[in-house]
Amino acid sequence: MGEIYKRIEDLCKSSKINITVMCKEAGVPRSALSDYKAGRIKTLSADKLSKIAAYFNVSVDYLLGNTDQKEKAPAKAEADDVTFDDFTYAMYHESRELDNEDKQALLNMARLLKKKIKEKE
C-alpha cells in the first residue's frame, strides 16, 4: 500500500469517516482508491488528489508524503481577505453541490458583505 493511501486512510480515521463516504462527499470515485490500494494503478490523478486534499483541508504535498505539515500554507491574499479555499472549506456542506460559477458568486457576496461591515466600523 502506498504512502498516499495510508495518509488518506489516517485522515479518514482521525475524522471518523470511512473512505467510501469521503470519496462520495469529495467527488472522487471509490474505485480509484481501491485500484491504487491494490496496485492496479501507480498513482492518483492530480484532480483526485486535489479534491481529497481540499476535503481534508490539507495540501497535496502532505498527501504525497513530501511534507508532514497537514495544514495548508496561508494564501497570498490579504490577511483579512476571504479566499476561495477558505470559503469552500467553511461552506463545504452547504455548497458542495453547487458548480464553480455559483460558488464564485457566493464568494463575491461574502466579500461584499465583509466590505460593508468594515465600512460601518
Image (cartoon, rainbow, N blue to C red):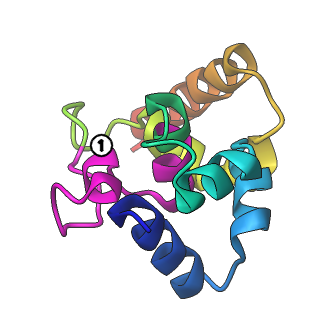
Vertical placement of residue 9 versus 65, above or below: below
Residue 115 visible in the picture:
no
Q: Position of residue 67 (x, y in %)?
A: 16, 60
Q: Tell me the residue at 55%/25% (across/down).
A: 112
Query: Which is nearer the eye, 88 or 77?
Result: 88
Instruction: Tell me the quarter of the image containing the N terminus.
Output: bottom left
Q: Dot 1, crowdedness within 10 Å: few (<14), some or many (≥20)?
A: few
Instruction: Tell me the quarter of the image containing the C terminus.
Output: top left
| Location of residue 13 (image quadrant) | bottom right
Amino acid of disc 1:
Asp
Q: Tell me the residue at 58%/54% (across/down).
A: 90
Q: Position of residue 54 (x, y in %)?
A: 50, 48
Q: Tell me the residue at 19%/32% (across/down).
A: 76
Vertical placement of residue 44 versus 68, above or below: above
| Location of residue 7 (image quadrant) | bottom left
**Residue 67 belongs to the span the image colors magenta:** yes
Query: Which is nearer the eye, 46 or 55?
Result: 46
Q: Which residues are magenta?
A: 50-74
Indicate the secondary structure of the residue bearing disc 1: loop
Q: Is residue 54 left or right of residue 98?
A: left
Q: Position of residue 117 (x, y in %)?
A: 49, 40
Query: Which residue is the site of mark 1?
Result: 80
